[in-house]
Image (tube, rainbow, N blue to C red):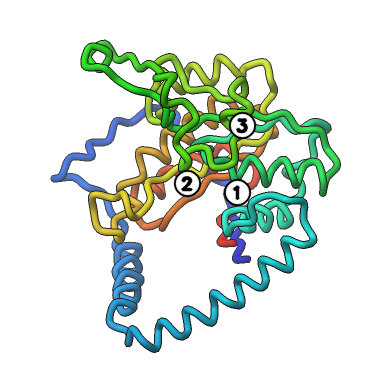
Amino acid sequence: MFKQKINNSNYQLPRDLVKIDYSDDSVIVFPELMEEKKRINDFKSVIDTLNYEKYSKVSYRSEVVSREFKQQLQSKLPKGPLTITWAKLYEIYCTFPEIFAHDTIEYFDLCAAPGIFIIQTQFYATKIMRKKINWHATTLNPFATRTKADSVEGKTTVDPENMFRTRLADDYGLIKKNIDKWIFGPHNTGDITDTENIQSYAEKLKDTGINIITSDCGVGQGNLPVHYTEQEGYNIGVAYGATTAALAILSKGGSYIMKTFTLFECSTVSLLYLLACLFENMYITKP
């Protein structure tokens, strides 16, 4: 796994708040990062020009090896989902076991559905570290419905007839079986970019002493209204929402694990700088 420690010993937050105009006429960019972004995107585009037959043969062989590896690994682990996401988080936990230094793990997962991060964190805490774990989670509520009047008033209700029917949202039954652990906010949406939701999460969890927060927030490529090369920029609002929630909830001495895409845009660099100022140790990793 790639691991880069950020030397943040000299980073400081500005004493005075500065409002920056991000209008189209004043977009801030880092030329070196934009050149790297172009280079990587050009490299990615080469895949589309590869000989499809040869690419398919190589892809098939890698899938066979991957499948056999998963089967062998699954035979040594408790029953449950073994996905790439599960394996990546497991690798992160193995690399940074100090995350679990607390006597009891108080865990909160952002953008959690279908719940792979929850399943992995429970597994690592109880089976590897032998710790007790209490968890809560939030996610974009797939069961919420809006009427026209509700939308005007900013309210969302749950349709009981549609509860727990969306397989994509609750593949492993974590919502249905643990509804008391899920927090969707005052409008019942689970929208991580909603300020009122973030405030309600902080209020709900203020006495729990949350010491680990994970965020798997992001809009997948298949749902993007823009080209995949702009995935980072399109997801920055979600990243800021998740980080705001994490900073409002996480206890002193806690750990925050956030999924990111690429790290080229000024808004992402600014977010990383903020985190570097607030956390004692900071790493960029690629499991």
- Tell me the residue that label 3 is attached to: 108
* Distance of label 3 from label 2 (alpha carbons): 21 Å
Residue 53 placement: quadrant? bottom left
Residue 254 left/right relative to 61: right
Q: Give the percent coordinates (x, y) of residue 59.
A: 47, 79
* Distance of label 1 from label 3 (alpha carbons): 19 Å
Q: Give the percent coordinates (x, y) of residue 261.
A: 43, 55
Return the disc, 3 or 2, that comes first in the chain's sequence: 3
Return the disc, 2 or 1, that comes first in the chain's sequence: 2
Secondary structure at badge 1 equals loop
Return the disc, 1 or 3, that comes first in the chain's sequence: 3
**Is residue 252 visible from the viewing direction of this image?**
no
- Tell me the residue that label 2 is attached to: 272
Q: Give the percent coordinates (x, y) of residue 95.
A: 71, 57
Q: Give the percent coordinates (x, y) of residue 88.
A: 61, 57
Taking the spot 34% from the left edge, 55% from the top edge, the residue there is: 221
- Tell me the residue that label 1 is attached to: 282
Q: Residues within 10 Å of mark 3 (few under 14, many from 20)?
A: many
Q: Amino acid at mark 2?
A: Leu
**Is residue 49 visible from the viewing direction of this image?**
yes
Taking the spot 70% from the left edge, 51% from the top edge, the residue there is: 93
Residue 3 left/right relative to 36: right
Taking the spot 23% from the left edge, 40% from the top edge, the residue there is: 22
Q: Nearer the viewer, residue 187 or 270?
A: 187
Residue located farthest toward the front when viewing the structure as drawn: 161
